[in-house]
C-alpha cells in the first residue's frame, strides 16, 4: 500500500452555484484526506483581492500536504460560501480517488465535477495531485 506525501493543489473553480442574493460569493474549501482536514483561504470580492477572484469563478492556487500511511484513500473537497451575517453555505463537493496518483506520481491540473448532496451539478473545480512515495529503509538488511 502507498506510503508517502500527497500534495493537493487547489487551482480554481468555475460555474459555481451562487445562492447569495445581495452580494457575490466568498468561497473557501475544506480539503479532507482520511481524518485530516485543511482549510483554504477565502476567495473574496474585495477590490484588493480582485486578482484572487471570488464569486462563482474563485481562484485559490493553494497547496496542501497530507501524510499517507496505509489504507484506501480519496480526497474530499467541500466548497463553502463564507457569509458575514449568517452561517456559511454549502456550495458542493467532489471526491477524488487517489489510485491514479499513487500509480503515476502526478495528476496535472484537471477539472472535477462539483455536486450537491443529491448529486446535482454545482460547478467544477480544478485540482492537481502529486504523490511522493516514502523511501523504504533497507539498511537493516545489510548489517552483519
Image (tube, helix red, strand yellow):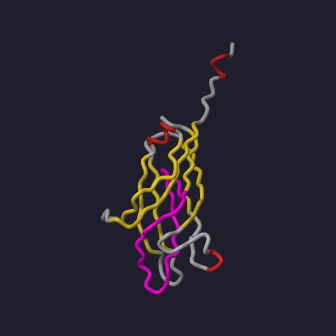
Residue 29 inside the magenta-drawn segment: yes
**Location of residue 36 with respect to 51 vertically, above or below:** above
Q: Residue at x 54, y 38 (%)?
A: 3
Taking the image as shown, residue 52 lies to the left or right of residue 99, namely: right
Q: Give x and y (percent) for residue 65.
A: 59, 51
Q: Of all residues shown, which one is farthest toward the top?
A: 144
Residue 56 inside the magenta-drawn segment: no
Total residue callouts: 0
Taking the image as shown, residue 133 lies to the left or right of residue 112, namely: right
**Location of residue 104 with respect to 12 vertically, above or below:** above
Taking the image as shown, residue 137 lies to the left or right of residue 74, namely: right
Q: Of all residues shown, which one is farthest toward the right?
A: 144
Q: Residue at x 66, y 16 (%)?
A: 142
Q: Give x and y (percent) for residue 110.
A: 47, 53
Q: Give x and y (percent) for residue 141.
A: 63, 18
Q: Residue at x 49, y 70 (%)?
A: 57
Q: Residue at x 59, y 36 (%)?
A: 134
Q: Which residues are magenta?
A: 10-37
For the C terminus, the image quarter is top right
Q: Nearer the viewer, residue 27 or 33?
A: 27
**Location of residue 82 with respect to 62 vertically, above or below:** below
> Residue 48 lies in what quarter of the image?
bottom right
Q: Nearer the viewer, residue 102 or 141?
A: 102
Q: Give x and y (percent) for residue 16.
A: 43, 69
Amino acid at each position: 500500500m502507498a506510503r508517502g506525501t500527497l500534495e493537493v493543489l487547489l487551482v480554481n473553480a468555475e460555474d459555481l452555484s451562487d445562492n447569495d442574493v445581495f452580494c457575490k460569493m466568498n468561497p473557501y474549501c475544506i480539503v479532507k484526506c482520511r481524518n485530516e482536514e485543511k482549510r483554504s483561504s477565502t476567495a473574496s470580492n474585495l477590490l484588493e483581492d480582485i486578482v484572487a477572484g471570488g464569486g462563482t469563478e474563485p481562484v485559490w492556487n493553494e497547496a496542501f500536504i497530507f501524510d499517507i500511511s496505509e489504507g484506501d484513500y480519496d480526497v474530499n473537497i467541500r466548497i463553502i460560501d463564507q457569509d458575514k451575517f449568517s452561517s456559511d453555505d454549502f456550495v458542493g463537493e467532489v471526491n477524488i480517488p487517489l489510485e491514479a496518483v499513487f500509480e503515476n506520481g502526478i495528476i496535472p491540473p484537471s477539472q472535477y465535477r462539483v455536486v450537491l448532496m443529491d448529486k446535482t451539478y454545482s460547478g467544477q473545480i480544478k485540482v492537481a495531485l502529486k504523490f511522493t512515495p516514502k523511501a523504504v529503509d533497507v539498511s537493516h538488511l545489510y548489517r552483519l
